Image: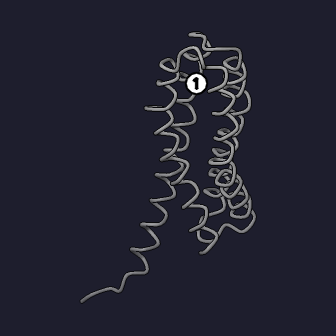
Amino acid sequence: MTLFVLHLAATQWMTGLIWFVQIVHYPLFEKVGGDFPAYQTAHMRLTTWVVGPWMLLEAATAVALAVRPEPLSRPLAWCNLALLAAIWLSTALLQVPQHERLLCGFQQRPHAALVRTNWLRTGLWSLRAAGLLAVLLGLLSSAAPKGG
């Protein structure tokens, strides 16, 4: 159960963060101005320190749950891992290239692509968060004492 709780915590953290990034952080990129290259460089460096540990914890616990799925069913654990793999692929193939293009300075096209493609990660993390919360609620309701 501890493994599941750690995984749930990491997923909920990342889900909240991705919504903040999608609604507030990425849209504000266009307001930075002439110092954008320095801003983008610092953004990429500092963001790694915030998301890195949580993404690694989430990935490690997702793999562990796929191997030993308690309290998840095996199909649910593998589905959870597949959705997380899709998030990582999206990050590597869609968002990181846009961030790298923005290192040269703010450009509307890569910025728009970053905001647009980030909806995929936002949706996938939200789906995973909701599914894992449903599992937790099921566990809590089955563990609750049955009153007469």
Q: Residue at x 69, y 43 (%)?
A: 48
Farthest residue, direction left: 148
Q: Secondary structure at mark 1?
A: helix
Give the amino acid at mark 1. Thr
Disc 1 designates what residue?
117
Q: Report the quarter where the C terminus lies.
A: bottom left
Please tell me whether residue 148 is drawn above or below residue 121 in the rendered image. below
Residue 29 position in % (x across, y down)? 52, 23
Please tell me whether residue 42 is drawn above or below residue 58 in the rendered image. above
Q: Is residue 42 left or right of residue 14?
A: right
Q: Is residue 96 left or right of residue 130?
A: right
Q: Residue at x 62, y 52 (%)?
A: 80
Residue toward you, 97 or 145: 97
Residue 129 position in % (x across, y down)? 50, 52
Q: Residue at x 64, y 41 (%)?
A: 47
Q: Report the quarter where the N terminus lies.
A: bottom right
Q: Residue at x 55, y 40 (%)?
A: 124
Residue toward you, 102 or 61: 102
Farthest residue, direction bottom: 148
Residue toward you, 126 or 113: 113
Residue 23 position in % (x across, y down)? 43, 32
